[in-house]
Amino acid sequence: MIGTIFLIIAFIGGVAAVAAYYRAATGRTNLLSLARIGMYLSAVGIIAASATLLYAILQHDFSNAYVWGYSSKSLPLHFLVSTFYAGQEGSFMFWVLCSAILSFFLLRYTRGRNLEAHVMAIFLATQSFLLLLLLTKSPFRSIWDVYAGQIAPGNIPQDGRGLNPLLQNFWMVIHPPILFIGFAASAVPFSFAVAALWRKEFTTWLKSASPWILFSGLVLGLGIMLGAYWAYGVLGWGGYWGWDPVENSSLIPWIVLMALLHTAIVQKKTGQLVRTNFFLAIAAFVLVLYSTFLTRSGVLGDASVHSFTDPGAVVYTLLLAFIVVFAVVGFGMMISRRKELKLQASPMGLLTREVALTLGAAALVLIAIVVLFGTSLPIFSKATVDGAFYDTVTLPLAFAIALLIGYSLKVKWESEDGKEILKRSAASLIGAVLVAAVMMYFGLHEVMVILFVFASAFTLFVNVELAYTIAKTDPRWLGGKIAHIGLALFFLGIITSAKYGTKEQVGLELNSPKSVGSYTMTYLGNHRIEGDKYAFDVNVKRGTENFTLSPVMFQTQEQGIMRNPDIRSTFTGDLYVSPISIDESVAGGSHAGEMLTLKKGETISVGDVKAKFVKFQMGQHGMDAMMGGAGGMSVGSVLELNNGHASETIVPTAVYAKDSAPQYNAAESKLLGANVRLVSMNVDMGSKESTVTLEVLRPGAVPQQSEILNLEVNTKPFMNLLWSGSVLLFIGFIVSMIQRRKEA
């Protein structure tokens, strides 16, 4: 109850502040003090409500429906704290908390720039709307209200339902909070844009807004990339991006913010793109609200693994109203000022930096439109868009962006001769051609991908050259070049990891080595690591490398079998091993003998006998079967055995009948004094990577039960380019933000 009272106080304070700031902006400047009191009252109420919820979580107050639904006594402290924003109500609470904290910084920032009344009125209006949502979807409802008829009044459960096992990870503590800070920060450029339209200050507002555009882009982008790393390194998806609708819904406003960042440079330098910048600043925030609607309204419940369930008709309506109100406010102000804004437009020279930046921003907006279309499609029809659609459509646009980044830095603001541009760009162009040629030599063939590699390498070399020059003169301006270097490396990391990577599903029998690509893997067994989680140890050898990977599987009531991969990262790439399942026995029954795995052409020692796997041999009836004839298919593995004094050839076989399991047959070896039975084959026609697994059955051997671990093994070359590029990108953002803050 006390938490709800704090929310009501915060809402009243916020609405009062908006009203007082509005009156102050229209001439009643004496109301500024009253407006600030309302702002402080709202912020303190939000902080107090947040502290109340956190206290209830830490005290295991299971009379609170939200606390009972997302926490439990067994959770460690860091996961217990993360339950604050694990559910819908808590995530809204955290968002409005971020907004309240930002309001202190924004008040101080705008107060000394004569922008306080207009900017704070808009910003606090967005905050008040969030508070209205919270009052409707409150995290302070009792368990007896929410589950009326299911739990007797006064009966408090002994424990909570706990946090979804999928969310019990270190990144849960970091990723969502950063994303929500980015959501809250996106309201600031929106507020500056609407305030500028209100004040009719069309050309100067970006100087004050630029640090906040950089900040919101930095934090929102960082949240997205941390989510990508979480998916890659922990969740076992085999990748870092799946084009899931909820992933996309955060990406779209970030792309629009990146477009705004570059068109803002054009306006500050030349006075161009005034209308474009207002549109992008407003659109970015409206798209954040649309992202919230997609995530929280339940409309993507069948299309996304991330989506929350239906929150109820009232919240659904409020979310839609949130979008409509602020879209009407923002774009309505643009329409009302259309005549004045039209006067700001003027023509551009063709071979100029402003044209290059404008085209790059247009390509970004087109990508946002494509992703928005694919993400929204499930709302209007039952159809969904797969990842191949996004990859195919966005690749040419990504090529254009990569090329234009480098080109824009080689062309001047004033019109000039194209020959001079080529002359200045020659070294970077040659370097880019060489990089593309090397990647073609190593198997890259798709024309569009080759062009993307060329453009990314061109941008990389251009920015390295300029960064070197700037570092010697004025390092304060290195931010943009560092960010562009990071982006180019990120692009190259996408291509190398996707186009040169491999994926293979394998079954590893306990203590039986098996060749997987260039590695030899041996399943060593499993052990419990915590609770009901089990690690499955896999020894990996390649050349002088010898290490153990331990992917994890565990059973949950909510999600079924959960799988966490293990990754070996080196400079040249990642070996990514994700568990699929564990079988209690293998085809062919229990084993009584020594297990051997040989590649085609490989020779190994079995005691004092050398055994070489020569080839597969197919029987005539097997050929008939493959050609459509009746009967089974017989495949033999030709082995040559030699002990230095005598040699022999044996052919253990497997018979594949049409309607029954394969039958594995043994061949007698006089040199080994044992029968050799074929256990499994990996047939790769025309390749030396074909392998066989054999069992040496000596007289008197005691059968032993075995097990097999099924894995997905991925190799991802030069993943470090992607992650290091991401780090450099955000370092560049920080450097630029500091410099823009000094300018403002």
Image (tube, rainbow, N blue to C red):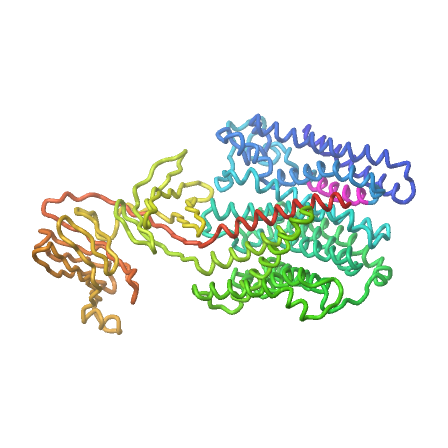
Q: Residue 244: horizontal and vertical position, in percent?
A: 55, 54
Q: Residue furthest front?
A: 472
Number of numbered discs visible in the structure rendering: 0
Is residue 306 visible in the rendered image? The answer is yes
Position of residue 131 in the picture relative to residue 687 (left or right): right
720 or 539, nearer to the observer: 720
Does residue 328 appear to the left or right of 259 in the view shown?
right
User: In the figure, 58 relative to 191: above or below?
Assistant: above
Q: What's the residue at 55%, 36% (across, down)? A: 69
Residue numbers of the magenta segment: 119-134
- Residue under the point 23% across and 63% down: 656
**Rendered-image quadrant of the N terminus:** top right
* Depth order, front residue of 322/264: 264
Residue 523 on image: x %, y % = 30, 45
| Residue at 79%, 52% in the rendered image | 329
The one nearer the camera, 646 or 113, is: 646
Residue 124 belongs to magenta span: yes
Vertical comparison of 419 with 97: above or below: below
Above or below residue 264? Residue 37 is: above
At x 57%, y 39%, the residue is 174
Quadrant hosting residue 534:
top left
Give the overall secondary structure of the magenta segment.
helix
Residue 110 in the magenta stretch? The answer is no
Image-based side of 654 in relation to 578, left or right: left
Quarter assignment of residue 259: bottom right
Residue 22 picture location, percent across and down: 85, 43
